[in-house]
Image (cartoon, grey):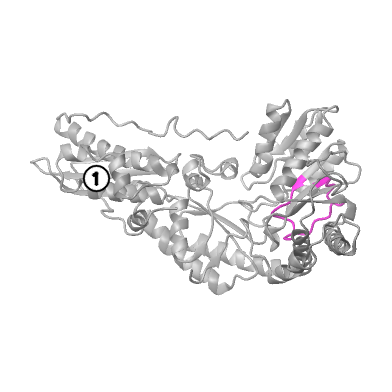
């Protein structure tokens, strides 16, 4: 079902954990749908992401996309981190099954939410960044009619 | 594939070697069509009738009340759709439960679109149907009550005798989906006032693609598949003789080994349940502690998600299943777990383990140690667990 890369990131997730006094923390998803991602960012005075950690409640794809998203933003500046889209995360994982695409959206959303928190705390504006939605699942993926 | 510990016997079972052996001659040696006049066809017919007798005996039914189908889902579809059609002049109301298999629930939705009214009766926190609600749901137009014998996810045994009596007293037909229960618990159709019963071969160490519907004599339901005189003109199509022979052999095996097999399973099931509840914190058992299938254990581990758990168990060679949304292909967790009142996030963290008579105590010990390790690892990654621990500090 999953690519080797997804399985690798699920079995050996990179950057699991918390950062105390993080520059920005973002939590997205909801327990009702079965996915919650939390991303911690440590951003230095030059706007470089020095460290990143995550915690995820969710399926194999949710864990793998969180892990890959943290790898993709680590060491980057804020504008580069903004370029880490769900598509980039998926490509880096050699794809996801169609029903799991929403996990990669959640990973992108989690990064954005952490950046938003950072921007709020430091009273800055990040170009292209919008206030995170609380629940990205609403209205998505209606079951196909069976009859 | 290395050694696997197969604990998903509610999904399907291993076809027993003696069942395969019984089936084999009916592929290339005795391949005759049972509807023919020559001797080769007669061999098939005889084998089919023997299987029918075995099944009828197991249920306390007559042989001409057993109709072979392609499996449990077909039997459920047939029972509901054909009763609805056959008894429409009497009424358009059907009563079922909220925790039925989708073969029942989706068929009910289909019937609702075709002018039928369905009442979905609630269950209590253990998954037992609320009998007072069932009684109150009865209307003059009620033509059928359909309640499963045992639930496929949480293993809860339903009060079938009581439901049968209620149906009988009110002149309403009673169908039960016994796909999980048949072969695991004794069933007598007269004692329980069952008018129709669905069962499947592959859940009791028989082959896939074969099952049956028991239809009590006198119940007026029509043909489901048109095109021939097979199955007393009620289900056309050349009979699946190897499948039927396999089903007969599996039922014979299930009935003769039932007592010994289920006693062993109950002992191991209880050992598993006791140790998991004791050794893994923030865990609950889903379903009734005692009124449950001999081989079923269903847990919810708080703060973690079921699919992750299944993948990690698979890496240890352990096969299980979960009611999490991720394993169902939708966003909602199992309707059964929601019906017993679990919040979504706890329903997402469910794990069903269903035993067979091949499972040993050593296997269970291995599974428990693996579970402890995996649950701990997933919790260490869970933001829900992090929040909970911070709050409780």
Q: Chain of mark 1?
A: A
Magenta stretch, residue numbers: B176-196
| Picture coordinates of residue B58, whole percent (x, y) | 83, 60
Horizontal arrangement in the rendering, residue A12 relative to residue B263 (left or right): left
Please identify the dominant SS of the magenta region.
Answer: loop
In which quadrant will I find the C terminus of chain A?
top right
| Residue furthest out toward the left | A46
Label 1 packing within 10 angstroms: few (<14), some (14-19), many (20+): many
Q: Residue at x 82, y 44 (%)?
A: B164
Residue B177 among those drawn in magenta: yes
Q: Residue at x 39, y 49 (%)?
A: A61
Q: Quadrant of residue B173?
A: top right
Q: Residue at x 70, y 66 (%)?
A: B262
Q: Nearer the viewer, residue B390 or B228?
A: B228
Residue A58 among those drawn in magenta: no
The local secondary structure at tag 1 comes to strand
Horizontal arrangement in the rendering, residue B260 relative to residue B296 (left or right): right
* Residue B392 shows up from this direction: no
| Picture coordinates of residue B144, whole percent (x, y) | 79, 36
Horizontal arrangement in the rendering, residue A95 relative to residue B253 (left or right): left
Horizontal arrangement in the rendering, residue A82 relative to residue B171 (left or right): left
| Picture coordinates of residue A77, whole percent (x, y) | 14, 41
* Residue B284 shows up from this direction: yes
| Picture coordinates of residue B131, whole percent (x, y) | 74, 40
Please name the residue that numbered disc 1 is placed on: A40
């Amino acid at each position: 079902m999953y690519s080797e890369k997804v399985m690798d990131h699920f079995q050996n997730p990179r950057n699991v954990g918390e950062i105390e006094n993080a520059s920005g923390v973002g939590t997205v998803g909801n327990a009702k749908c079965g996915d919650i991602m939390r991303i911690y960012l440590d951003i230095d005075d030059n706007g470089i992401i020095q460290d990143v950690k995550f915690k995820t409640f969710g399926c194999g794809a949710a864990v793998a996309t969180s892990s890959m998203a943290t790898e993709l933003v680590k060491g980057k500046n804020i504008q580069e981190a903004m370029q880490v889209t769900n598509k980039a995360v998926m490509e880096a994982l050699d794809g996801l099954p169609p029903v799991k695409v929403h996990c990669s959206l959640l990973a992108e959303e989690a990064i954005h939410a952490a950046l938003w928190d950072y921007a709020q705390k430091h009273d800055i504006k990040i170009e292209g960044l919008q206030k995170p939605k609380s629940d990205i699942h609403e209205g998505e993926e209606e079951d196909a009619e069976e009859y | 594939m290395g050694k696997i510990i197969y604990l998903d016997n509610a999904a399907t079972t291993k076809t027993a070697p003696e069942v395969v052996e019984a089936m084999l001659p009916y592929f290339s040696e005795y391949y005759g069509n049972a509807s023919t006049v020559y001797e080769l066809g007669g061999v098939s017919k005889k084998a089919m009738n023997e299987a029918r007798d075995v099944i009828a005996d197991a249920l306390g039914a007559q042989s001409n009340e057993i109709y072979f189908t392609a499996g449990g889902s077909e039997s459920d579809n047939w029972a509901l759709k054909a009763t609805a059609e056959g008894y429409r002049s009497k009424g358009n109301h059907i009563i079922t439960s909220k925790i039925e298999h989708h073969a029942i629930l989706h068929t009910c939705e289909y019937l609702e679109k075709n002018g039928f009214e369905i009442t979905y009766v609630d269950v209590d926190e253990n998954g037992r149907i609320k009998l007072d609600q069932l009684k109150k749901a009865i209307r003059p137009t009620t033509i059928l009550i359909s309640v499963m014998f045992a639930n496929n996810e949480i293993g809860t045994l339903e009060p079938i005798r009581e439901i049968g009596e209620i149906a009988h007293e009110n002149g309403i037909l009673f169908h039960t989906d016994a796909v999980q229960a048949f072969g695991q618990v004794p069933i007598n159709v007269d004692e329980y006032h069952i008018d129709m019963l669905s069962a499947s071969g592959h859940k009791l160490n028989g082959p896939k693609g074969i099952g049956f519907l028991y239809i009590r004599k006198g119940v007026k339901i029509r043909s489901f598949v048109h095109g021939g005189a097979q199955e007393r003109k009620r289900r056309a199509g050349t009979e699946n003789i190897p499948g039927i022979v396999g089903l007969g052999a599996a039922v014979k095996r299930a009935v003769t080994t039932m007592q010994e097999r289920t006693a062993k399973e109950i002992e191991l099931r209880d050992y598993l349940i006791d140790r998991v509840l004791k050794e893994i914190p923030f865990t609950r058992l889903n379903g009734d502690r005692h009124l449950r299938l001999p081989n079923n254990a269903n847990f919810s581990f708080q703060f973690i998600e079921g699919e992750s758990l299944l993948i990690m168990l698979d890496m240890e060679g352990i096969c299980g299943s979960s009611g999490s949304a991720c394993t169902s292909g939708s966003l909602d967790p199992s309707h059964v777990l929601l019906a017993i009142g679990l919040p979504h996030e706890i329903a997402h963290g469910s794990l069903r383990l269903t035993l067979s008579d091949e499972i040993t105590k050593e296997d269970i010990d291995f599974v428990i140690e693996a579970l402890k390790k995996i649950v701990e690892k997933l919790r260490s990654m869970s933001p829900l667990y992090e929040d909970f621990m911070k709050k409780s500090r």
